[in-house]
Image (spheres, helix red, strand yellow):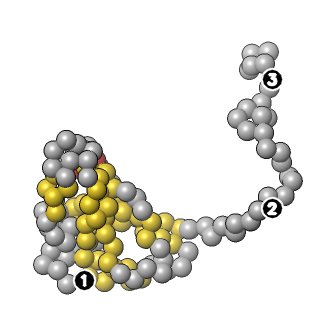
Amino acid sequence: MKIKLIPFDNCRLPKREHYNDSGADCFAAEDVIIPPHGVVKIPTGVGAKTPDGYDIVVHCKSGLSSQGIWAANAPVDAGYRGEIHAILYNTTDEPFKIIGGEKIGQFVVRPVVYAEFTYDLGNERGSGAFGSTGKKGGYNE
């Protein structure tokens, strides 16, 4: 997978701290203040050429999550070639400052299954839901 830097002062390539980490840290390309209960789109200064059959999601960093800052986890499609942004939400009652160059999320590359959407679901199984295949009257009978 190819990654490109977009010229900003604080641009950094994503970095995986350990070889078996599922995500690679991504960084803010500029200073941003997230208002209380506000949502902000933060540039990462990075674009990607993601192969077909995969997408990228910017997941939360546990350190930020523990402070009330959550990532939207919106998928970045394989065909997208622009700059990737982290969408962060401040769940707190105070403004939260992000400084350019700080870790703001983790890029996770995921396989995608391309579903075929149709109106005809066939008739292999009925529409029974919760508990429809279990015993009637409880488990202890």
Image quadrant where one finds the N terminus: bottom left
- Quadrant into which the C terminus falls: top right
Q: Earlier in the sequence, mark 3 or mark 1?
A: 1
Q: What kind of element bears circle 2?
A: loop
- Which residue is tagged 2? 120
SS type, badge 3:
loop
Q: Residue at x 79, y 58 (%)?
A: 121
126 or 40: nearer the viewer = 40
Residue beneath the point at 15% across and 49% down: 95
In this figure, which residue is indicated by the disc labeled 1? 6
Q: How far apart are marks 3 and 2 (CA)?
A: 30 Å
Q: Please give the name of the residue rendered at 36% of the width and 63% of the height, measured from the top-left corner.
A: 58
Q: Name the residue under label 3.
A: 136
Kind of residue at badge 2: Asp
- Under circle 1, the secondary element is loop
**Other residues around mark 3 within 10 Å, as few (<14) / some (14–19) / many (≥20):** few
Q: What residue type is labelled 3?
A: Lys
Instruction: Give coordinates of residue 89: x percent, y percent.
Output: 29, 53
